[in-house]
Image (cartoon, rainbow, N blue to C red):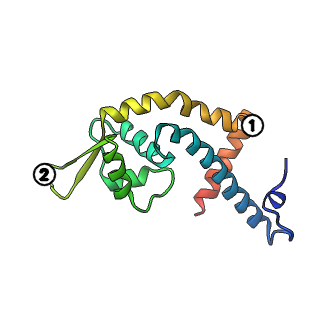
Amino acid sequence: MAGLKQEIAQQRPFATLEEEALLNLLRTSDCLDRAVHRKTREWGVSSTQYNVLRILRGAQPDGLTCSAIGRRMITAEPDITRLLKRLKALKLIRQQRDAQDRRVVRTRISEAGLKLLSAMDPVILAAPGELLGGLKQEELAELIRLLELARGSV
């Protein structure tokens, strides 16, 4: 397996070990994200849209506000309103103003959204094993520990 330096055709050494670790992490994240996106696009949704649908499925029956969805996202989405608008156009979600406070809009997954997730579940649930199956259980546990440790300092 080629190292990062070879993958990105870098001639000079990395400035620090931290730089090399960070760039490896970013490169790996991008590779995994693209692999997941290839799986979700078979159903006409992006991996980010899939993430929103899963969040809303878990928030049934009450649904969530736009800001609550944003806080639960795996990757930050700068324009959640536009993302939700696209999902609404696909009829995968429905939105309704709160009866007590008309400024609040609750978003819920639709029956079509639930049906789509049911179709996607077997393929998407198999993806982590396919993508990370080369790591042993203790390596995965250590990877999780290290990633959480790194995220804690941000």
User: Residue sitting at 17 percent across and 50 percent down?
Assistant: 98
Q: Are marks 1 and 2 in contact (CB under 8 Å)?
A: no
Determine whether the residue tagged by mark 2 lies in a helix, strand or loop: loop
Please tell me in which quadrant of the rendered image residue 92 appears.
top left
Q: Give the crowd class for mark 2: few <14, some 14-19, many >=20 residues within 10 Å.
A: few
Give above or below for 116 relative to 50. above
What's the amino acid at mark 1? Leu
Spatial CA span between label 1 and label 2: 50 Å
Give above or below for 134 relative to 78. above
Question: Seen in the image, is 97 located left or right of residue 87?
Answer: left
User: Residue sitting at 64 percent across and 57 percent down?
Assistant: 150
Q: Position of residue 67 (x, y in %)?
A: 34, 56
Quarter in which the C terminus is drawn: bottom right
Q: Position of residue 47 (x, y in %)?
A: 51, 46
Question: Seen in the image, is 131 located left or right of residue 10?
Answer: left
Q: Earlier in the sequence, mark 1 or mark 2?
A: 2
Give above or below for 34 relative to 40. below
How many numbered marks are there? 2
Determine whether the residue tagged by mark 1 lies in a helix, strand or loop: loop
Q: Position of residue 100 (x, y in %)?
A: 13, 51
Work out which residue is located at the far left of the displayed protein and give it: 100
Q: Give the crowd class for mark 1: few <14, some 14-19, many >=20 residues within 10 Å.
A: few
User: Residue sitting at 68 percent across and 51 percent down?
Assistant: 146
User: Residue sitting at 61 percent across and 51 percent down?
Assistant: 148
Question: Seen in the image, is 143 located left or right of residue 90?
Answer: right
Q: Position of residue 108 (x, y in %)?
A: 29, 41
- Judging by the rendered image, the residue that carries numbered circle 1 is 135
- Judging by the rendered image, the residue that carries numbered circle 2 is 100
Question: Seen in the image, is 126 located left or right of residue 109?
Answer: right
What's the amino acid at mark 2? Gln
Depth order, front residue of 89/25: 89
